[in-house]
Image (cartoon, grey):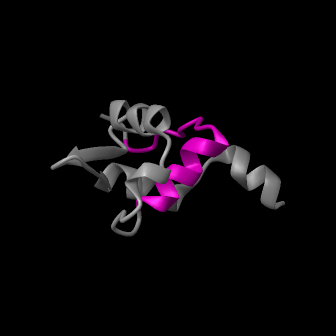
Amino acid sequence: MNDEIDYALTPDQWETLKALRVPVSKFSTLNRFVLDDLVALGLATMSDDMPAITPRGRKALIRGSSRLWDVAA
């Protein structure tokens, strides 16, 4: 498996992934479809019906997306 994958996430997916950095107390505010996509990519997980970011998700957040870098430039 290559850890250098650049994820082409949508803005909603990036926002949801950022929201998972802290324990989610307002799970109902997260878009379930977006969360399911992140789980399918291995960037998030569900434990006891609560979402959490995975180590792979943290790496993706830290590394960011090339599209996000373009916006910041």
Q: Residue at x 67, y 46 (%)?
A: 66
Q: Residue at x 72, y 44 (%)?
A: 67
User: Where, by quadrant of the figure, is residue 42 drawn?
Assistant: top left
Quarter of the C terminus within the rendering? bottom right
Residue 10 in the image: state x and y as whole percent.
Answer: 63, 38
Q: Is residue 4 magenta?
A: yes
Hey, which residue is sitting farthest right in the picture? 73
In the image, residue 44 above or below residue 69: above
Left or right for 39, reference 9: left
In the depicted view, which residue is nearer to us: 36 or 54? 36
Q: Residue at x 61, y 43 (%)?
A: 12
Left or right for 48, reference 19: left
In the depicted view, which residue is nearer to us: 21 or 30? 30
Left or right for 68, reference 14: right
Residue 62 in the image: state x and y as whole percent.
Answer: 50, 62
Residue 40 in the image: state x and y as whole percent.
Answer: 35, 30
Q: Is residue 62 magenta?
A: no
Residue 58 in the image: state x and y as whole percent.
Answer: 40, 58
Left or right for 5, reference 23: right
Q: Residue at x 54, y 40 (%)?
A: 6
In the depicted view, which residue is nearer to us: 37 or 29? 29
Quarter of the N terminus within the rendering? top left
